[in-house]
Image: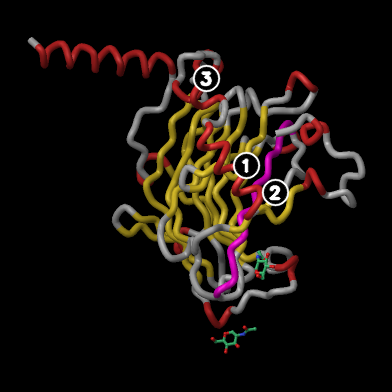
Amino acid sequence: MESCRKLLVLLQFLAATLIAGVTAKPVTFFNDFRVTWADSHVKQEGPVVHLILDQSSGCGFASKNKYLFGRVSMKLKLVSGDSAGTVTAFYMNSDTDAVRDELDFEFLGNRSGQPYTVQTNVYANGKGDREQRVNLWFDPSADFHVYTILWNHCHILFSVDEVPIRVYKNNQARGVAFPNHQPMGVFSTLWEADDWATRGGLEKINWSKAPFSAYYKDFDIEGCLAGPSSAACAANSGNWWEGAAYCQLSTEQARMYRWVRLNHLIYDYCGDKSRYPVPPPECQAGI
Ligand SMILES: *[C@@H]1O[C@H](CO)[C@@H](O)[C@H](O)[C@H]1NC(C)=O
Ligand SMILES: *[C@@H]1O[C@H](CO)[C@@H](O)[C@H](O)[C@H]1NC(C)=O
């Protein structure tokens, strides 16, 4: 009897999930992603996806589906040793050219022993130029760490091992663009960008250290699948990622976020007077 009830509940849950157009778990590389750039440089090694950059090519992969609101996370282990000039990225992108929405995590390599920089950016309705940079409080090439993008109607939250490093609030009421209707795919790339990545382009990639490797695993995506029911799914305030606990930082998250801003923030476009003599409206609206 009891197990019958459990099965029924499970079936009801699955039906509700399917009707709502919410993604089913678990996400696997094989089922949910495809290689987008340089097959020969992407290797699947058990549960781990290994990206390779050498002088012939970088590489990348992307989700087969797009998602409207939700949470995406994966574990990354970045290029070790002398990674100057390399950029490893994990981002979401609507792929809609002029009115593109995009949420970026970019990991900028460095000379051996010097700290990695994490750059985040938010494009809404075609406009980006909202870079922030933090350095990490651990060596991200020594082990896997969790990188997460939470996107709901309240805000976009970038976290590292559950520590918030950036919050982009929904300030639509103040006329600030916020991605709210275009589903986005999930992308990863490893490439060379030594014209800007490390100390503004001063540090060049050292090809004698190639190949460079970055590793990805434990993909998790929960959100509204793009398709005929995505708008209805996204409007459902019952989706867990829209819940009160995800709409604002908890006391502990707020404490950690302040700690990151005080100790690890190295650049914030909001404070860049030479670029923005008048701070953009989302900066004036406060964080
Ligand atoms: C690399 O290390 C230098 C020296 O510690 C630091 O100034 C810089 O912000 C680091 N990151 C990048 C991407 O240049
Ligand atoms: C590049 O790597 C080689 C081999 O480790 C080393 O001898 C050389 O000094 C490095 N060049 C730079 C600019 O760091």
Left or right position of 46 against 178 = left
CA distance separating discs 3 and 1: 26 Å
Which of 38/106 is in front? Answer: 106
Q: Kindly indicate whether the residue at mark 3 contacts the one at mark 2 (C-beta within 8 angstroms).
A: no
Residue 1 x %, y %: 7, 10
> In the rendered image, which residue does mark 2 sit on?
132
Which residue in the structure is indicated by mark 3?
230
Question: In front of the other: label 2 or label 3?
Answer: 2
Residue extent of the magenta highlight: 113-125
Q: CA distance from mark 2 to mark 3?
A: 30 Å
Please name whichever residue, 82 or 99, is drawn nearer the observer in this view of the structure.
82
Amino acid type of the residue tagged 2 in the rendering: Gln
Q: What is the number of the mark on residue 96?
A: none
Disc on the earlier residue, 3 or 1: 1
Give the labeled residue for mark 1.
Answer: 166
Determine whether 132 is above or below 254 in the image.
below
